[in-house]
Image (spheres, rainbow, N blue to C red):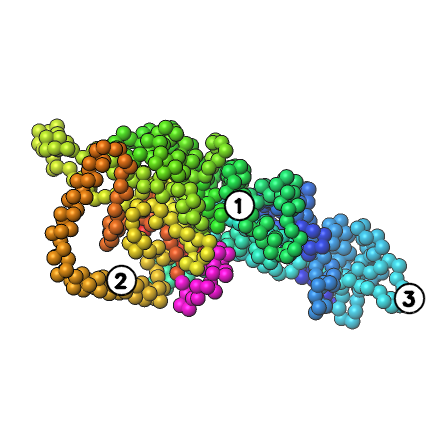
């Protein structure tokens, strides 16, 4: 029995392998096995492939992408392949070039005839060696059965052969593609249903990262890598848990859910080459040091654009429209997603986090302007400040109109603007179609933008409103308290307990169930948010440090715990030192106490007279020491009590060396990947508050 060469698939019914490529110069690559099977069974109908992220059109021979803006790819089926030399390889390796389907059918007939002829009841190969098939796609070549010693192969040869075949190039044909694996296919197939979608807004520099000559991954490629990494870790953890349950003879754990990451790309919409702004920018750019000027035009210019109200509006409208379109497309691809309890979340990186913050601010403005005003159950309503006494700048808000809190607020006293949202030429009417289950800011300069917008004073005003509203609900005398405590049954209920402690954290919140501001401690672009939500009089030493990011809020690394203990001991030693110093100074302080008390009373009387004669602005309250040894809970965090989370540092971590890659390494950071897996797992809404 002769031995066949390059027969990778010897089955009788040879399955078609579907391949794709983007450009003519690219190598044909096979699709996932599960997608090839679906296309073979589709009978020419369109098929969702890549887990629903793309659609294959076999009749048109193209692949289009559902959730990202990419050019369509060419699609062909094949059963026979040519061993073509790889021009990019130095080891004389070959690549598989698919044979046209019509030619493959003719070659397959010739192969089957050769197999029958070489069988026990066949007539022998001599009769088959004289047969040939002329290729329809390449009439200058033919395919013959060639015998070389004990090997038989299918060869592609020129029709007009030279004498003795000198210098003749013979190409071996291969039946079937052979065994292959597609990265990420096995892990994604092992997971369960898709239950969570994360829309990820890119930041600055995406115009540069999308250039072919730049090696940095674009946001589209980063999301592909992040998806594969998340799937791999989920499957690995699940299999380990299955082995543990088998050893302990316990029921196997459920299959992990799947998470989809969809990038929101806005740079190409506002940076169109035909736009007059871009042509003007090109004309004014000097031709010297082009690499550095490219960084300025492709990276830094994004921030300058967003600081301009007109382009800020254009970017926000672009991102909002993109999210709405992808939201609709996703539900078309996955029609039962919401019925199965699927959730949507929002992630922003770098400037993209500021965009995500502003998108949620617009969502808050639009959805809450017609909401019912404050009640006893929910007395704090930011959109409509109540009537109790408040800071003078709130009166200005009433005059300006509080229904649109995103515009610039003009204070009567200081002439400064205050807003937590963007300043736009006109009010936006479109918003995103969902309230995010999670909102994650990565490497975010939101704290810087809020500082520039004067949001700190606005958040303080909200705190004053909340204090006044709470005070209006507390009875003023015993008679009123008895009315509250009276019950219809004739028996008095226990007197109500009123919280008289000052409100420390601003009641400001965004429409999201959980909010995380995650940053690397060495990231030069990242800023905190929590200090802006605290009173302006709070000392920097009293501001609580950011939490360390960990999947379950407890699994801190040993060296991080040791660092925390060291910091705590340092603070305690500092407190003891202050105590000894104060003890030593008690004698001198007692001698001057009487004089100081008299001077204080005189100053108080003078201040009261000035306040009676002229309505001056109230003094800023002194919040020094107000949050020391107290638990803080920020309403902005949603189901979490904190907002700022820093990545755990390494054992040996130089902050200056880390700063080089800190801002661009969030989507490959192990802590963040584990955190996303933990927060998006099935049943994550039942997590205890952090």
Which mark sits nearer the N-terminus, 2 or 1? 1
**Is residue 145 found left or right of 559 in the rendered image?**
right
- Image-quadrant location for residue 237: bottom left
Query: Which residue is the site of mark 3?
Result: 163
Which mark sits nearer the N-terminus, 3 or 1? 3
Do residues under tags 2 and 1 come within 8 Å of each other at their CB atoms? Answer: no
Do residues under tags 2 and 3 come within 8 Å of each other at their CB atoms? Answer: no
Discs 2/1, front: 1
Q: Residue at x 82, y 57 (%)?
A: 142
Find the magenta span and give its range: 649-671
Q: Nearer the viewer, residue 304 or 191?
A: 304
Q: Quadrant of the N terminus?
A: bottom right
On the image, the x and y values in percent for residue 302 come to 54, 46
- The CA span between labels 2 and 1 is 41 Å
Q: Residue at x 11, y 52 (%)?
A: 594
- Within 10 Å of the Cα at label 1, are there few (<14), some (14-19), or many (20+) other Cα atoms? few
Q: Which mark is residue 443?
A: none
Q: Secondary structure at mark 2?
A: helix
**Is residue 404 found left or right of 95 in the rendered image?**
left
């Amino acid at each position: 029995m002769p031995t066949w060469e390059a027969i990778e698939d010897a089955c009788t019914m040879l399955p078609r392998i579907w391949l794709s490529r983007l450009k003519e110069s690219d190598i044909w690559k096979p699709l996932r096995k599960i997608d090839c099977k679906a296309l073979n069974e589709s009978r020419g109908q369109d098929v969702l492939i890549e887990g629903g992220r793309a659609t294959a059109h076999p009749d048109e021979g193209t692949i289009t992408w559902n959730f990202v803006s990419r050019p369509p790819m060419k699609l062909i089926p094949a059963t026979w392949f040519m061993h073509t030399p790889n021009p990019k390889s130095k080891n004389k390796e070959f690549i598989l070039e698919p044979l046209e389907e019509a030619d493959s059918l003719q070659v397959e007939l010739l192969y089957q005839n050769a197999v029958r002829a070489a069988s026990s009841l066949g007539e022998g190969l001599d009769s088959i060696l004289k047969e040939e098939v002329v290729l329809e796609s390449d009439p200058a070549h033919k395919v013959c059965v060639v015998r070389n010693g004990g090997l038989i192969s299918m060869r592609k040869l020129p029709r007009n052969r030279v004498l003795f075949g000198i210098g003749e190039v013979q190409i071996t044909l291969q039946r079937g593609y052979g065994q292959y694996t597609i990265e990420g296919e096995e892990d994604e197939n092992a997971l369960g249903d898709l239950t969570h979608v994360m829309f990820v807004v890119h930041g600055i520099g995406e115009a540069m990262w999308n250039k072919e000559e730049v090696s940095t991954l674009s946001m589209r490629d980063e999301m592909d890598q992040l998806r594969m990494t998340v799937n791999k870790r989920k499957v690995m953890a699940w299999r380990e848990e299955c082995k543990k349950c088998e050893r302990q003879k316990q029921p196997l754990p459920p299959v992990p859910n799947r998470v989809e990451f969809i990038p929101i790309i806005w740079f190409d919409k506002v940076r169109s080459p035909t736009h007059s702004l871009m042509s003007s920018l090109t004309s004014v750019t000097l031709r010297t040091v082009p690499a550095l000027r490219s960084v300025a035009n492709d990276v830094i210019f994004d921030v300058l654009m967003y600081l301009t109200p007109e382009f800020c509006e254009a970017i926000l409208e672009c991102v909002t429209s993109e999210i709405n379109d992808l939201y609709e497309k996703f539900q078309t691809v996955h029609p039962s997603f919401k019925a199965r309890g699927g959730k949507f979340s929002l992630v922003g990186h770098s400037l993209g986090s500021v965009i995500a913050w502003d998108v949620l601010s617009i969502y808050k403005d639009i959805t809450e302007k017609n909401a019912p005003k404050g009640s006893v159950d929910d007395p704090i309503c930011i959109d409509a400040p109540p009537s109790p006494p408040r800071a003078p700048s709130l009166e200005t808000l009433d005059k300006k109109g509080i229904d649109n809190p995103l515009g610039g607020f003009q204070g009567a006293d200081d002439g400064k603007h205050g807003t937590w949202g963007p300043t736009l030429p006109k009010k936006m009417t479109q918003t995103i179609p969902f309230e995010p289950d999670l909102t994650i800011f990565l490497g975010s300069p939101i704290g810087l933008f809020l500082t520039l917008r004067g949001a700190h004073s606005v958040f303080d005003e909200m705190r004053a409103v909340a204090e006044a509203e709470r005070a209006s609900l507390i009875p003023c005398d015993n008679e009123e308290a008895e009315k509250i405590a009276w019950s219809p049954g004739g028996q008095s209920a226990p007197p109500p307990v009123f919280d008289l402690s000052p409100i420390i954290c601003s009641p400001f919140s965004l429409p999201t169930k959980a909010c995380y501001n995650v940053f690397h401690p060495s990231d030069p672009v990242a800023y905190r948010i929590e200090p802006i939500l605290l009173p302006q009089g709070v000392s920097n030493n009293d501001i609580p440090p950011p939490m360390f990011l960990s999947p379950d809020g407890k699994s801190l690394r040993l060296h991080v715990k040791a660092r925390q203990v060291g910091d705590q001991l340092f603070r305690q030693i500092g407190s003891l030192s202050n105590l000894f110093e104060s003890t030593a100074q008690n004698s001198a302080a007692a001698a001057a106490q009487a004089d100081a008390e008299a001077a204080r009373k005189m100053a108080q009387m003078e201040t009261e007279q000035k306040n009676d004669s002229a309505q001056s602005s109230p003094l800023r309250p002194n919040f020094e020491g107000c949050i020391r040894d107290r638990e803080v809970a920020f309403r902005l965090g949603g189901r979490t009590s904190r907002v700022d989370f820093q990545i755990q540092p390494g054992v040996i971590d130089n902050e200056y060396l880390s700063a080089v890659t800190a801002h661009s390494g969030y989507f490959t950071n192990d802590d963040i990947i584990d955190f996303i897996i933990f927060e998006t797992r099935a049943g994550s809404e039942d997590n205890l508050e952090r």
